[in-house]
């Protein structure tokens, strides 16, 4: 990072990812990068200011569990309506599986992500209304060891 001043770094991050966004993305690692980008892009204007980037990173590295879970929730809540629906979860899980599958799970079958999504909703959607709220997400993650491990897995991906 030496040699980069704040504004330069912000421009670099923004420009690099904007170029990625403009290409038609296939379902590979860049798809997950796209979602990560949106999560960092707190103002939702298609570019990440250096400040957004540092704030996001330091939260992920040093934040409380609650803060990390909130950040992850916002990563999954693609349209930012405050709920995670099945379509959003499917998109994210597929993006992660597609990225990791190439390196970690060569034998993964196509329907595994869907099973992951089903299991996710069974655990998290406490009131069975078809969407997961932040509170449902936080409670379910904290009470479920497997989910915490998978959170750890997702963190390692980033
Ligand atoms: Ca949503
Ligand atoms: Ca619910």
Image (spheres, grey):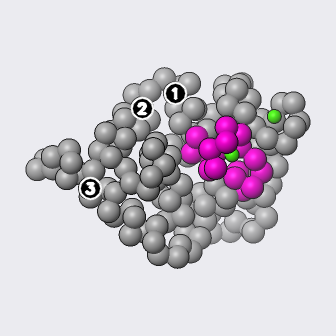
Tell me which segment is drawn in magenta. 74-90
From the Cβ of disc 3, is ligand 1 less than 8 Å away?
A: no
Task: For residue 93, say whether it is visible.
Answer: no
Which residue position holds label 1? 67
On the picture, is 47 further left or further right than 28?
Answer: left
> In this rendering, which labeled residue sits more in front, label 1 or label 3?
3
Sort mark 2 into few (<14), some (14-19) or many (20+) by Cα contacts within 10 Å: some
> Is disc 1 placed on a helix, strand or loop?
helix
State the image coordinates of residue 41 (x, y, percent, origin top left). 44, 47
Query: According to the image, label 2 marks what residue?
Result: 59
Q: Earlier in the sequence, mark 1 or mark 3?
A: 3
- Which is more N-terminal, label 2 or label 3? 3
Task: Give the quadrant of residue 13.
Answer: bottom left
Would you say 96 lies left or right of 85 here?
left
Q: Are marks 3 and 2 in contact (CB under 8 Å)?
A: no
Q: Nearer the viewer, residue 115 or 132?
A: 132
Looking at this view, is 120 or 156 the one in front? 120
Q: Considering only order in the chain, which callout, 2 or 1, is on the residue closer to the N terminus?
A: 2
Mark 3, residue position: 11
Could you tell me which residue is drawn at 74 percent across and 29 percent down? 136
Label 2 near ligand 1 (CB < 8 Å): no
In the image, residue 13 lies in the stretch drawn in magenta: no
């Amino acid at each position: 990072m030496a040699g980069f001043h704040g504004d330069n770094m912000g421009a670099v991050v923004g420009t690099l990812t904007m170029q990625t966004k403009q290409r038609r993305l296939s379902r590979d690692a860049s798809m997950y990068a796209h979602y990560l980008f949106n999560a960092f892009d707190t103002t939702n204007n298609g570019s990440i200011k250096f400040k957004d980037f540092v704030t996001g990173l330091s939260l992920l590295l040093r934040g409380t569990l609650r803060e990390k879970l909130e950040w992850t929730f916002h990563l999954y809540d693609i349209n930012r309506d405050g709920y995670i629906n099945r379509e959003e979860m499917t998109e994210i899980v597929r993006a992660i599986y597609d990225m990791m599958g190439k390196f970690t799970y060569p034998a993964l079958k196509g329907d595994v992500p869907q099973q992951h999504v089903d299991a996710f909703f069974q655990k998290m959607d406490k009131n069975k209304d078809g969407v997961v709220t932040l509170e449902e997400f936080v409670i379910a993650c904290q009470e479920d060891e497997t989910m915490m491990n998978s959170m750890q897995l997702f963190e390692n991906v980033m």
